[in-house]
Image (cartoon, rainbow, N blue to C red):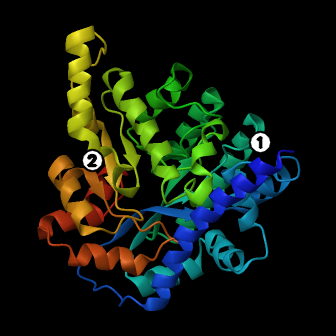
């Protein structure tokens, strides 16, 4: 066991916790209950299942490094953080609905908390994903109109993932898919994962790419100062995943595929001018690149972003200018962030009312096929 890696992984997890704990303090500061003026559908809202947590407990017995693993062990621990957070993750029943009512949230689109099932072996991941999807579908049936859901899949077994995707949509009535970014350091643009992209396009449901820690081989520069988690490393890793998809040509192959990125696009919208310019320069001077369109074309056609954990009006206004209101969804990132803060931010934003309606609910209804 490499003690430096163990401590580094813990530091990364604690960095993520520091960000999330800050959200806890804002709850104490007190945001007023939002008005009932808007229908609010929150689109990146985490839950956990007993099979998933049991899997984390088992894997923690023989793995001892990595920020993802360290965070899972914190959720299983006896800290004040775990005693607060883990029960809220497990509650996809009356308690969560009561909290939503108190916070002015009409519906949550639920997804299995990061790192989902992607730490596990393929067989274990497939089994836990299937059981967790059944639990999710049951919660949706018990609370009609309050929950929608993204199906967990095991990307490291693409064939069985496709089977589960079909079952999730056509039998369980779920609304899309959650992938916690890389799987063993591999990304969805790679050809081995194309069956998953093809299935999502055929089923007309989006894939939400949620952050997780960077691959272990890339973590060293992020370990100091708590940069491996939500404060920086998650966006670097997940933004890289999104950029690979934009530049790989998968959206030429799957033109109707929809990908969702949280946290205002994981930084990608900020780089639109530069990556378009550099792509065109390289193509003109060296003949590199085979995309049919500029990368930003696919960003606007094939990707949507959410406001999860990024409650900043200047960032929102910039993203509206770059992407348009049809490509932005509201999210809180519950229970890691405060529902009321998420709503207060958008309620107060100086943007057109029609855009607020799209962001709060209209876009989610369209993309996730949520009935009004």
Pick the front one: 215 or 327 = 215
The correct choice, above or below, for 32 with respect to 44 in the image is below
Q: Residue at x 58, y 62 (%)?
A: 16
**Residue 88 at x, y = what percent?**
62, 75
**Residue bearing mark 1:** 124
Quarter of the picture containing the C terminus is bottom left
Q: Residue at x 70, y 53 (%)?
A: 9
Give the crowd class for mark 2: few <14, some 14-19, many >=20 residues within 10 Å.
some
Pick the front one: 40 or 188 = 188
**Residue 132 at x, y = what percent?**
66, 54
SS state under label 2: helix
SS state under label 1: helix
**Residue bearing mark 2:** 270
Quarter of the picture containing the N terminus is top right
Pick the front one: 329 or 262 = 262
Q: Does residue 96 appear in this view?
A: yes
The correct choice, above or below, for 345 with respect to 30 in the image is above
Q: How many marks?
A: 2
């Amino acid at each position: 066991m490499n003690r430096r890696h163990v401590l580094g992984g813990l530091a990364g997890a604690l960095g993520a916790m520091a960000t999330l704990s800050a959200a806890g303090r804002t709850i104490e500061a007190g945001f007023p209950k939002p008005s009932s003026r808007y229908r609010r559908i929150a689109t990146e809202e985490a839950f956990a299942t007993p099979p998933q947590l049991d899997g984390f407990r088992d894997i923690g017995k023989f793995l001892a490094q990595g920020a993802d693993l360290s965070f899972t062990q914190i959720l299983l621990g006896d800290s004040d953080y775990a005693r607060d957070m883990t029960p809220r993750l497990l509650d996809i029943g009356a308690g969560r609905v009561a909290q939503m009512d108190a916070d002015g949230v009409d519906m949550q689109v639920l997804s299995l908390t990061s790192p989902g099932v992607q730490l596990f072996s393929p067989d274990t991941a497939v089994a836990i994903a299937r059981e967790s999807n059944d639990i999710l579908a049951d919660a949706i049936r018990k609370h009609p109109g309050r929950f929608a859901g993204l199906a967990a899949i095991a990307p490291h077994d693409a064939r069985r993932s496709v089977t589960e995707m079909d079952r999730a949509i056509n039998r369980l009535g779920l609304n899309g898919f959650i992938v916690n970014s890389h799987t063993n350091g591999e990304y969805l643009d790679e050809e081995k994962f194309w069956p998953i992209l093809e299935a999502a396009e055929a089923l007309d449901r989006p894939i939400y790419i949620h952050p997780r820690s960077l691959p272990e081989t890339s973590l060293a520069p992020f370990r100091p100062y708590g940069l491996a988690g939500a404060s920086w490393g998650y966006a670097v890793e997940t933004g890289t995943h999104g950029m690979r998809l934009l530049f790989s040509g998968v959206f030429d192959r799957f033109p109707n595929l929809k990908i969702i990125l949280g946290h205002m696009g994981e930084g990608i919208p900020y780089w639109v001018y530069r990556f378009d310019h550099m792509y065109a320069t390289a193509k003109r001077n060296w003949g590199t690149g085979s995309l049919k369109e500029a990368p930003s074309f696919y960003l606007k056609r094939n990707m949507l972003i959410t406001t999860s954990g990024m409650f900043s009006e200047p960032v929102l206004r910039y993203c509206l200018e770059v992407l348009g209101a049809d490509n932005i969804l509201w999210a809180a990132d519950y229970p890691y962030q405060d529902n009321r803060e998420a709503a207060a931010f958008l309620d107060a934003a100086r943007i057109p009312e029609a855009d607020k309606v799209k962001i709060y609910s209209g876009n989610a209804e369209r993309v996730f096929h949520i009935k009004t």
